[in-house]
Amino acid sequence: MLGNFTYSNPTRLHFGCQSAESLALELERFGKKVMLCYGGGSIKKNGVYDDVIGALKKTGKEVFEDPGVMSNPTVEKLYEGCKIAKENNVDLILAVGGGSTIDYAKGVSVSAWSDEDPWKKYYLEMREPDNKIIPVGCVLTMVGTGSEMNGGSVITNHEQKLKIGHVFGDEVMPKFAVLNPKYTFTVPKYQMTAGFFDIMSHIMEQYFSGEDDNTSDYIAEALMKSLINSSRAAVKNPEDYEARSNVMWTATWALNTLIACGKTTDWEVHMIGQAIGAYTDATHGMTLSAVSLPYYKMIMPYGIPKFKRFAENVWGVCSDGKTDEQTALEGLAAMEGWMKELDLVLNARKLGVTEEMLDGIAGASFILDGGYKKLTKDEVIEILKQSMNY
Ligand code: NZQ
Ligand code: ZN
């Protein structure tokens, strides 16, 4: 049964090659002072920076640059950004980059005018903003997180060995998002495929929960099929516009709250992945790929009907003459084959995980109860060990 829900998504999204024009159009709606956040400099090499600066100049903005947003943005960087935003009383935060830059911009948006420590308030205590929120807009250059159309903001605290995401409400979600598939052509292969698996994981986290005949699950299956097809094409030819545009749009729908409507969700793979990230600073999508196979094999016996459906509807496995369990296992085997084609990380050692970290990572993995099986800490350790022996 579809549970009760309220659906709303305030992000206005512009898709396609007219990105500079779309950006200028959006910028007109905001005040003069714009804080421009970006990462380690890829946008200066691939021309995106020039397009953005062109739109900012055309609309007469005063620009305050905040470069150097790292992958897995840190709490220290967040404090730095808050200072720039507050001192200059900016009217808009424009994030140009991937999930890290956009998540960071949302963090600054709610924190700059807060009198309390944002790490404690938003990430440890999960409280909601009660102060001025600075509007955020974004130009997406790397596909995967869905941050362009959701309220998620994940921040890492290396000192406390915690990586925590807060999902903020409508008022923090980007007011606009500019998506140009061509901007993603230059993403390095490792990051590109990590992003592809991040998308798959977002869909699976919402799919493998509940037993109902639910519209969201049919949409999820279609998104997974599109992703599988287009990811294969994009790996062969990174400049395949059709493939890159399909993946980009799929990523947005995978995590803009639509497919979670009316159903329970899991998110345990992300909890373990984020804990690995807190210890190793590894690439987000690869932390998920490294633990997904052992995790899904462990929970499969508790959700056989859904795993069978996944095998048949997503991977085209024929169930004739097979037990439900055999069909379900073939589905996971097909997924494993696809993961190998993409050259994803399947062994957590490749991310820097060591035996000494296991207890700490398991302790930092929040245990949720929306999936088919609520894990124990020992089971998290077992999943990590299986990954390390893959
Ligand atoms: O720093 P730059 O120079 O921009 O380089 C980036 C970075 O090294 C590079 N890159 C991005 N676009 C490029 C490019 N290189 C060449 N050409 C381009 N067009 O790619 C690298 C990775 O970028 P990053 O933004 O870190 O990746 P991603 O988009 O995967 O974001 C990861 C962060 O998002 C969080 C993750 O935990 C992680 O901190 N997540 C956010 C979510 C949300 N908001 O809902 C949900 C996700 O599950 C995830 O947790
Ligand atoms: Zn993710």
Image: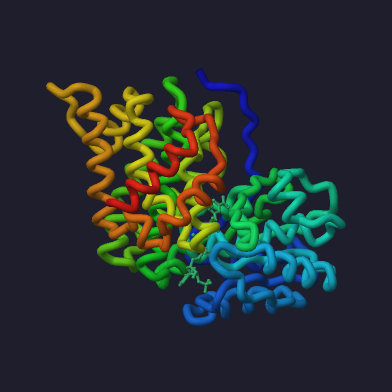
The answer to whether 52 is drawn above or below residue 233 in the figure is below
Q: Residue furthest right?
A: 115
Q: Quadrant of residue 74?
A: bottom right
Q: Left or right of 124: which side holds 244? A: left
Residue 85 location (% of width, % of height): 78, 68
Tell me the residue at 37%/36% (across/down): 221
Residue 212 location (% of width, % of height): 44, 20
Tell me the residue at 37%/65% (across/down): 190
Tell me the residue at 41%/59% (across/down): 354
Q: Residue furthest top?
A: 1
Front residue of 242/84: it is 84
Q: How is the image coloured?
A: rainbow
Tell me the residue at 47%/69% (across/down): 183
Q: Quadrant of residue 296?
A: top left
Q: Left or right of 45: which side holds 325? A: left
Residue 164 location (% of width, % of height): 61, 51
The answer to whether 49 is drawn above or below residue 306 in the figure is below
